[in-house]
Amino acid sequence: MKETVMKLFLMQLQYAGIPEDAYHFLPESQRKLLIEKKGRFFLRDEERKKIRVVLTGGVFDILHIGHIFTLEEAKKQGDLLIVAVAKDEMIRKKNREPIHEQDYRKIMVGSLKMVDLALSGFENPQDMIEFIRPDVIAYGYDQKEFLKPNGIEIIKVSKKIDDRKFKTRKILEDLGL
């Protein structure tokens, strides 16, 4: 049953609510777990509470072992790991030009076995929290804890790989970029 709830939750996130045409293809046992809101279907609150959802995020411009390690540690905190991949505009606001566009980075992160779903970051992080409704927000050891919503557990991944070698900035410097 937990696997079914996880599957439906991921579907709900991918489509911003399960569309009616997809809903009708679901078995009756799964349709009973959902509630309709404005023409879309979402897990009932009592079903959503059966899974622990972890949210983390980052740029992931040059995917490296430090990212892999941090995502593995974040995944250990729950049943599903949702990763928000920073928008290109957000990277530019920090005076850095992304090497890879967001869609490319999202595909790369989404292909990692510990990641259940990679999403594009939102303009407003609070909107993302309301959309995903995570139980846990996991920050990497070098990330600022900029979101601390009430009722959501905040985890700081304290373990790290030798970041003298495996930091994006260091890799870019070594490549002369």
Image (spheres, rainbow, N blue to C red):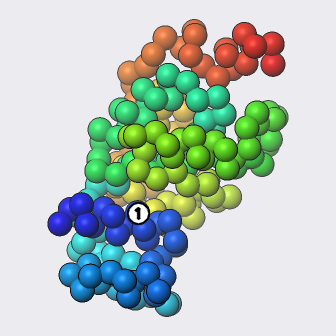
Q: Is residue 92 above or below residue 121?
A: above
Q: Which residue is farthest left? A: 1
Q: Dot 1: what SS?
A: helix
Question: Looking at the rendering, which quadrant does residue 159 occupy?
Answer: top left
Task: Write the residue at 72% across / 10% down.
Answer: 174
User: Where does residue 22 sit, x and y in percent of width and height?
Assistant: 43, 81
Residue at 29% across, 47% down: 78
Farthest residue in the front direction? 25
Q: Is residue 154 above or below residue 164?
A: below
The residue under label 1 is 10
Q: Is residue 74 left or right of residue 99?
A: left
**Viewport quadrant of the N terminus:** bottom left
94 sits left or right of 106 in the view = right
| Residue at image coords 63%, 42% | 105
Residue 32 lies left or right of residue 150; in this view the side is left
- Where in the figure is residue 84, as x and y percent of width and height? 55, 49
Residue 6 location (% of width, % of height):
30, 62
Q: Is residue 130 visible?
A: no
